[in-house]
Amino acid sequence: MSDSRSFDFIIAGGGSAGCVLANRLSASGQWQVCLIEAGPDDSSPFIHMPAGIIPVIRSKLLNWSFWTTPQPNCAGRSMYWPRGRTLGGSSSINGMCYIRGHAWDYDHWAALGNDGWAYKDVLPYFRRMENFEAIDKVDDGRSYHGTDGPLNVAEPRYVNPLMTAFLAAGREAGHPETDDFNGAQQEGVGLYHTMQKGGQRCSNARGFLEPAKKRPNLTVLTRTHVEKVLFDGKRAVGVRVQRAGRSEDLKARVEVILAAGALGSPQILMLSGVGPKDELARHRIAPVHELPGVGENLQDHLDIHITMREETRHSISLRPLGLLKTVINTFRYLFGKRGELTSNFAQAGGFLRSNDEQAIPDLQWHLVPFVYANHGQTLTPLFKHYAFSLMTCFLRPESRGRVKLIDADPLSPPMIDANYLATERDLQALVDGFRKAREILAQPSIAKHAIDELEPGPAVQTDEQIRDYIRKKSETVYHPVGTCKMGRDAMAVVDHRLCVHGLQGLRVVDASIMPTLIGGNTNAPTTMIAERASDLILQDAALGRLVPNYRPAPAPAAAFAEK
């Protein structure tokens, strides 16, 4: 390059979506691509060890550690929102459950006017991104899964006996059992497939970015904070970043792509002068383009737990015998990548309907073999109890929150108002889910492992008592989406090709573009969004739609062949 600060594509955000884009856009060798990540690289051993989730979620280096505003419908609590701050983003610190959501979710996106996002359209991208190890072990696996993609999806190497007891309890309670939540039947109880390879986490950084890092046309900048998008009129022409305390400008010859997530992307847009007029004026930010939907439409899954004290000691504890078991399992992991430390902990779960009126599942379960204690921030209960917790979330909340700016400082965290439990439906669905969770925990196969209910305890019985418990104890299950939604209406931020309405040279590619929250964990859908977006971007570039008469450098003689 003649100018080391100039690239064809600049990707702001090295998380789940950014790693996919960096790989796919640089694959031909024609385009100069720059990937920018605010956090460090993903070298921490706790990222790669599946059971290292507790240290990384407690880390102040690898985690943005956001907090919401006080939530009036959740007893006035400010609620903790961990988000990945390293290469791979939240795919480097999450629970690794590989869930796509229900086919209905994507058909619904298309029905809202988003052409090309129906389930039949996105299924090929889910298949393209996968190396699904269990393809011949699940029903009709080759219709739903791929085996040539960068993201490795595996069966668990170790299954806690509590998980198999839960599956048996599900059958006793009348729930079907499914061998593949991403196949023909989502409803039922089963074991989660996980984003792992060889007993280690397969984050999007490991799956997509690592094979691409050696390409000479890909530049990866870590510990680099994007301050704003730079514009020439209505065209994005680069970004201003802060590195080592100094600001510098990086130029984009073709396109700037925001991939900073449901919190970061709307924040960057508003700091750049793109967003609601009143919000920009409140912080004296010079307006570039008014888009009232930026930061609106925030959706998240809210979780409520039931914790049972356990007598069979299969759960994870920091009591003396539990610590001894951990030492043994550490050796099994270090010298063979086997045993409990290869576990994502939330190994079993299920999808069910809150009532018979629901056509598809609207509740999700995750079972974890320890005391649930404030996202791992509080470890004291682990020293006191052997226990397991069943988490229940409502999959399609009606409540809508928003992301705003605290001030005009790019280093300040965003202002997050989740607006949880704003509707009666959201609260009642969790009450119904709580009762169904108690029902399965009372079945003989799982009840024989339990001593009693530790939290909330037998005193909580009536609907109003359960509602009060939900308001006081529910927490995020880490799935914020929707703040730069895709669509055609007045509050849409991007169109169906993920281009920002009213601007040129600027796209958003991450979970923020989801118009509605899908029925499941969000990392796999975010990866799919980036896979599809990379095709859209390269199609537009090949047809000269992005910059008229601009042609990239010739491809090298030896084309890149990495997945």
Image (tube, helix red, strand yellow):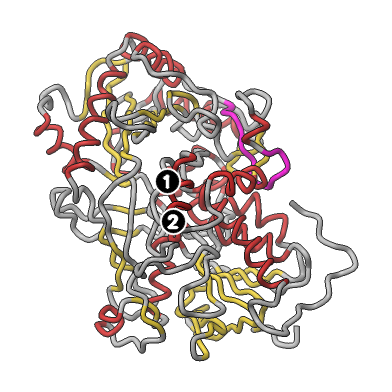
- Write the residue at 42% across / 81% down: 272
Magenta-tinted stretch:
146-157
Where residue 436 appears, x then y in whole percent? 27, 24
Say which residue label 1 marks: 518
The answer to whether residue 245 is magenta is no
Q: Is residue 86 above or below residue 300?
A: below
* Crowd class of label 2 (few under 14; some 14 to 19; many from 20; radius 10 Å): many
Residue 147 in magenta stretch: yes
Query: Which one is in front, 515 or 87?
Result: 515
Q: Which residue is mark 2?
A: 514
Please state which amino acid type lies under the numbered disc 1: Ile
Q: Nearer the viewer, residue 439 or 113?
A: 113
The residue drawn where x is 56% and y is 52% is 527
Q: Residue at x 29, y 46 (%)?
A: 397
Residue depicted at x 68% and y 72%? 541
Where is residue 445 drawn, in percent x and y? 37, 10
